[in-house]
Amino acid sequence: MAKEIPQILKGFRDYLPQEQLARKKIMQKISEVFERFGFAPMDTPALEYYELLGGKYGEEGEQLMYKFEDQGGRKVAMRYDLTVPMARFVASYPELPKPFKRYQMAPVWRADKPQKGRYREFMQCDVDIIGSDSIIADAEVIATFDAAFKSLEIGEVKVKFNDRKLVDQVLTKLNIVKKDIGNFMRTLDKLDKIGEEKVVESLVEQGFDRNILKKYSQLMEKSSKGYVNQMTQLLSGLGVEQMEFDKYLMRGLVYYTGIVFEFVLVAKPEFGSVCGGGRYDDLLEKTTGVKMPAVGGSIGLDRLFAAIQEMDVVAPQTAAEVIVFNLDENLTADYLNMTTNLRNAGIDAEVVYEPSKLDKQFKYAQAKNMQVAVIFGPDEASARKVTLKNLREKEQRTVDLANLVAEVKSMLW
Amino acid sequence: MAKEIPQILKGFRDYLPQEQLARKKIMQKISEVFERFGFAPMDTPALEYYELLGGKYGEEGEQLMYKFEDQGGRKVAMRYDLTVPMARFVASYPELPKPFKRYQMAPVWRADKPQKGRYREFMQCDVDIIGSDSIIADAEVIATFDAAFKSLEIGEVKVKFNDRKLVDQVLTKLNIVKKDIGNFMRTLDKLDKIGEEKVVESLVEQGFDRNILKKYSQLMEKSSKGYVNQMTQLLSGLGVEQMEFDKYLMRGLVYYTGIVFEFVLVAKPEFGSVCGGGRYDDLLEKTTGVKMPAVGGSIGLDRLFAAIQEMDVVAPQTAAEVIVFNLDENLTADYLNMTTNLRNAGIDAEVVYEPSKLDKQFKYAQAKNMQVAVIFGPDEASARKVTLKNLREKEQRTVDLANLVAEVKSMLW
């Protein structure tokens, strides 16, 4: 029989109730903070014209994008990220007041090689400010993510930032020509992983001066002072406590034009960046023909969720707190009434549909991690009493049926 | 320039912030009720092996399903509904305690002819109980949806129900042979729309006896009494107030095996059924080889949302309640502090990034439907005062800067 069970697609996954309850809670907390910072939710379709998405994500994107011809012969593609569809969105509704502050939590699809923690469908959680080139907007995007992480109570987070304009200026001063800047940045971006020595080696191999890294470092230190002071003040004014200028931080080299940033969990640095972003003032024009400055970022919800699971800060979840056992078919009306009364009092409650051995019902309740079992048989019925069992502390009490809701509440809260 | 803006795909749509805020609120209320009834959330991928979905939705499904070959040469398809993937899910995790009570809110895709209110991507909102053949489970699915609608405060809802087993029995008694039962049901299902006379005509054309409808009606009345009594009592025990046995209700003829039901909004009958479902005891075995009884249903979230928009019961939505105006670049630190204090008090607040004409800032605040503007210029700064303007009632007051948060709260709540 087992081999008849159809398989889930390679690189995809299901979310079981326990995980999904925890994920939902995390997403809800994050979205509350986003709204507190004035970002409004919006959504775009899972499918777009391939014409829109094609050529926007480099060669890799071209290979990994799910694309096909639809029933009308249109070339379409599944959403590869949330940024390019958002650019189309902003261009399509010119009446949206600017700056347009939006957030979006939605899955994207990439036919990437599946490996531990990397899936072909994953949630992105983006915040963007479109239509402002203010440095306050830069700081606010960072402050929004910072507050979102704080709301999750997962310990300290730290944001590292740099500015691509500063980097450009310094490299120009060092007489590095435009066409080499990309390679230089890509090499420096590896410093965290491979160390200074290997970066220098790699730079020399590429034909750069052996002292170029030292010179870059010194010049960045000097040139960045004013900027770092200003950004630190803005961030601190917006409630961010831990920030660090990182002159080696470069991030996705393609479209950033100003600030770039990354968040790390102080207690779990091994998870790397759980959020990153930056300013991308040219992307909207390239994508839609509408010139508009923009800054934003994205939480990698799946990586964050994996880290949170390891941190053991999410309590075990259950959908139902209370279970009304079914001991006698003739008492069905009572069971339904009790269940309905509990639910009307805002308590998550289940009722067992068919009378069965008490043992079996206890097993079900434990498997679902429920808290209180309501036991009501013919004896209790004639005495108008009900037995309540705390399934976690194994303690039980018998109370008046009329006090059911109040007694259950006192056991839950 | 306009013609450079890429288009949204035909039959798809964007959700603008106002709509998305309202949709989010509706979905949240519904999911709270689902959890109160003991249903747990779960999720499955957007893509599945075509092998799983193909042949499960009849000829129409075959034509409307988005299917393609992925990078690995697999035949895949986008989720066409939530039921078949759920069947795979249940079969894949035999350790899930039974009955498995789940809900799922997720988009599905069908390349249907786009028309008013019908899109190629739409949200389904399903509740199912897998692994119980109890009639209480039937009643509970209905009671769950009923409570969900009540939580939305959209006026009275009524559930109509019928039972396919009853119908089968009656038709057999009427000597209608198995192969004609489908046609008979499909014709009767139209009674609501085309009326009794036309139904009789159509039945006669198909070769049925001219009195068949009358006979069916009489025999159903008689045969259903016990069932209707029992179901009415169960529903009422679970808090359902308005229910009606409808002997002509048939619904999607393919896989239902027992109860079938539909909800209508009493104030908006023209929207038709906003929710429907039934028992489908054979589907899991057909789909996965694992035999398991099941009952469930689905809210058509988009139709419901359209009805709600017409009913004018959803208040205008905004992401940010308060806006801190920017009148002077030198006061940036004050603006950020004020904004941060408001946010820390749980108030949704925005700050304007660049100083500009007051007029322009008011226009932005109005376009975003904000409630309170915080006005703080050099005069206010030296007096340590701040002016608060209620943007809806056009009334304003000047208060001590130290009382900002308390004063704003008093204006909002």
Image (spheres, coloured by chain):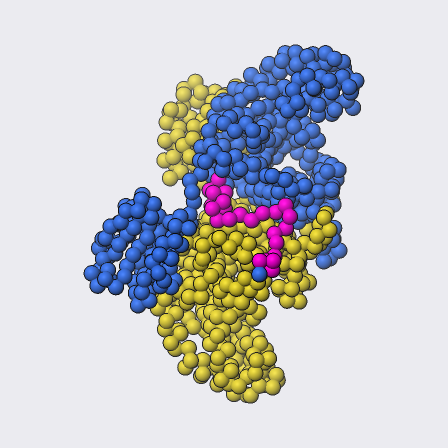
Chain colours: A blue, B yellow
Give how far across and how far down residue A184 sits, in percent. Answer: 73, 21
Give how far across and how far down residue A200 sits, in percent. Answer: 71, 17
* Of the pair A352 and A154, the residue shown nearer to us: A352
Asked if residue A19 lies left or right of residue B4, the reply is left
Q: Quadrant of the N terminus of chain A?
A: bottom right
Q: Which residues are magenta?
A: A2-26
Give how far across and how far down residue B32 sits, in percent. Answer: 43, 50
Give how far across and how far down residue A138 sits, in percent. Answer: 58, 27
Asked if residue A199 lies left or right of residue A124, the reply is right
Q: Residue at x 50, y 46 (%)?
A: A20
* Of the pair A170 and A366, the residue shown nearer to us: A366
Across the whole image, how many numbered discs are drawn on residues?
Answer: 0
Q: Quadrant of the C terminus of chain A?
A: top left
* Of the pair B231 and B323, the residue shown nearer to us: B231
Q: Residue at x 37, y 31 (%)?
A: B407
Can residue B96 be seen?
A: yes
* Of the pair A396 and A25, the residue shown nearer to us: A396
Residue A95 in the magenta stretch? The answer is no
Q: Quadrant of residue A163?
A: top right
Can residue B121 be seen?
A: no
Q: In the displayed structure, would residue A284 be above or below residue B190?
A: above
Q: Quadrant of residue B108?
A: bottom right
Asked if residue A345 lies left or right of residue A281, the reply is left
Residue A9 in the magenta stretch? The answer is yes
Q: Residue at x 44, y 63 (%)?
A: B132
Q: In the displayed structure, would residue A58 be above or below residue B251?
A: above
Q: Residue at x 31, y 58 (%)?
A: A338
